[in-house]
Image (cartoon, rainbow, N blue to C red):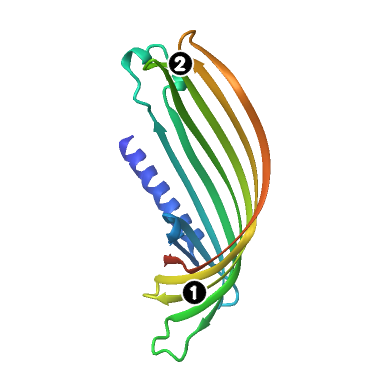
Amino acid sequence: MKKLITLSLLIFLGYSSSFSQKKLKGKEIGIDLRNFNNNGNINFLIRKDTKDSLIKKRKNISFSFQNNSNFPNYLASDLDIIANEYKSATNNFGSINFAWGKEHYIQLDDISSKDIYFYHGFIKSAGMSNQTSQNLSLSYTNNILSRINKSYNNTVSFNLGLSLLGGLKYNFSPKIAIGIESGLHAGIRLGASESKSTQYTMSDKSSTDLNSTKSTSTSTFFNTNLINAIWFSYKF
């Protein structure tokens, strides 16, 4: 039985490996590092050959998530009274973005190396983000904690963009390439926000809603980056 299980696993792994290689054949997969002016982020990069050897389809996928909590310096005796939702303030941010388009390559024949290419292209993008922020403010009466105010804001944003990119690609080897690119980016961002605040009273251990508002917004963005990204890829 053990031999049969082992043989089955080897056949399955071999088939999976063969299927993956066929599926990835002709593709470049890598990462690019970008947004250096805003702490930076990492994108997954996928390229696929077309019938024209100097044109490649390109896709970028990126996502991020941040979460942190603030804990006021409460007295141990107060913690026994305070409701759990007022013991800390949580802030988080999450986003996912997709980009797709075509890159057009021009070989730089006047350079001694035949592995350097200039490329350019229009890249479309779409993304969504969600940001939640909370804040606690404490009120004291005769140096005794009497009230806790908690503010809450949640914003959901959708964005559509278009980028004009230009860059240099160097084929470090038949399988490995590196590159650097710059770009112009423009688009529209749609947002919906909800804000509310509540108050917790220590004396009667009760919570009261103070106010609540909802709003929508529309904005445009435009930016330029001399160095938009530095990327590395591997060709299958």
Q: Is residue 227 above or below residue 76?
A: below
Picture coordinates of residue 69, whole percent (x, y): 41, 32
* Residue 167, numbered label: 1
Amino acid at pointer 2 = Ala
Picture coordinates of residue 157, whole percent (x, y): 61, 45
Mark 2 lies on residue: 83
Q: Pick whichever, 159 or 12, lies toward us.
A: 159
- Residue 99 placement, left or right of 85: right
Amino acid at pointer 1 = Gly
Q: Is residue 184 visible?
A: yes
Q: Pick whichever, 121 or 80, lies toward us.
A: 80
Q: Pick whichever, 144 or 39, lies toward us.
A: 144
Q: Residue at x 49, y 41 (%)?
A: 93
Q: Residues within 10 Å of mark 1 (few under 14, many from 20)?
A: many
Residue 169 occupies which quadrant of the picture?
Answer: bottom left
Q: Is residue 171 above or below residue 99?
A: below
| Dot 2 or dot 1, earlier in sequence | 2
